[in-house]
Amino acid sequence: STRGKAAEVAKTEAVTAKAEAEAKQAAAEASETQTAAVGDKVTEVKNAASGTTVSGRRLKRDTATTSGDVTYSFTVPASCSSFLNMVGEMTTAINLGTKPGYKKATAIGVALVNVVVATVACTSSDVGSLDVLTTKITAAQSELTTAIIKQKIKIKEAVEAINKAIATIKAVNEILVAYGQTGLADPGTTLATVTAPTL
């Protein structure tokens, strides 16, 4: 049956779309968590640069995060300029809006949260640059929130498409069997419906 075969194709495509959306959502959520931690670190550095005392933590030299087939490794910044540049690089990676971009941003964030405030030694002249980074981080967090919602919507739509395809295949199978023909492969059971926020 043409209708049944089309439903099988639709189901396969929806299963793939669902898996891709789930992977991208997971990457964006990991990046969102790390971005919040980096925002806190920027505030710590800014407070120290403004003259507020902040205790430092032990410096970790290298951090690595594996994402699929790519391993990102970043050295923990040891100067104010490298810290500023790396935070900028992280927000740029987020703004790509891609799974690899989110994974790279997460790895950069892992290095950034290990920064020792006293080691990067930003000064009062760096406060303006730190303020700009705070704005960029806020924008990146907003981008991530939107990206996560978009993936949840894609997952919801994929589940609906899978369930519709399963229902179609089952209906076609009933007709085929009623006419003494071999049915299509069992499409399995429908998935639990999911909800998603709206944008």
Image (tube, rainbow, N blue to C red):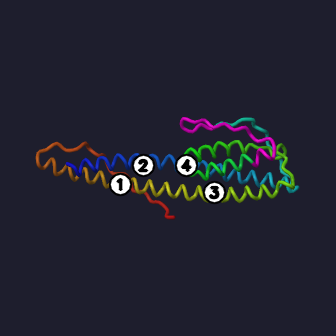
Taking depth in this image into account, of 118 and 69 the one nearest to the observer is 69
- State the mark number for residue 17: 2
SS of the residue at dot 4? loop
State the residue at coordinates (83%, 54%): 126
Where does the magenta region start and end? 65-84
* Contact (Cβ within 8 Å) of mark 4 with mark 3: no
Per the model, the C-alpha gap separating discs 2 and 4 is: 15 Å
SS of the residue at dot 1? helix
Per the model, the C-alpha gap separating discs 2 and 3 is: 24 Å
- State the mark number for residue 161: 1
* Contact (Cβ within 8 Å) of mark 1 with mark 2: yes
- State the mark number for residue 11: none
SS of the residue at dot 2? helix
Q: Which amino acid is tagged 4?
A: Thr
- State the mark number for residue 98: 4
Q: Earlier in the sequence, mark 4 or mark 3?
A: 4
**Residue 9 coordinates in the image, percent (x, y):** 31, 47
Estimate how packed mark 4 is, as few (under 14), some (14 to 19) or many (20 or more) residues with alpha carbons within 10 Å. some
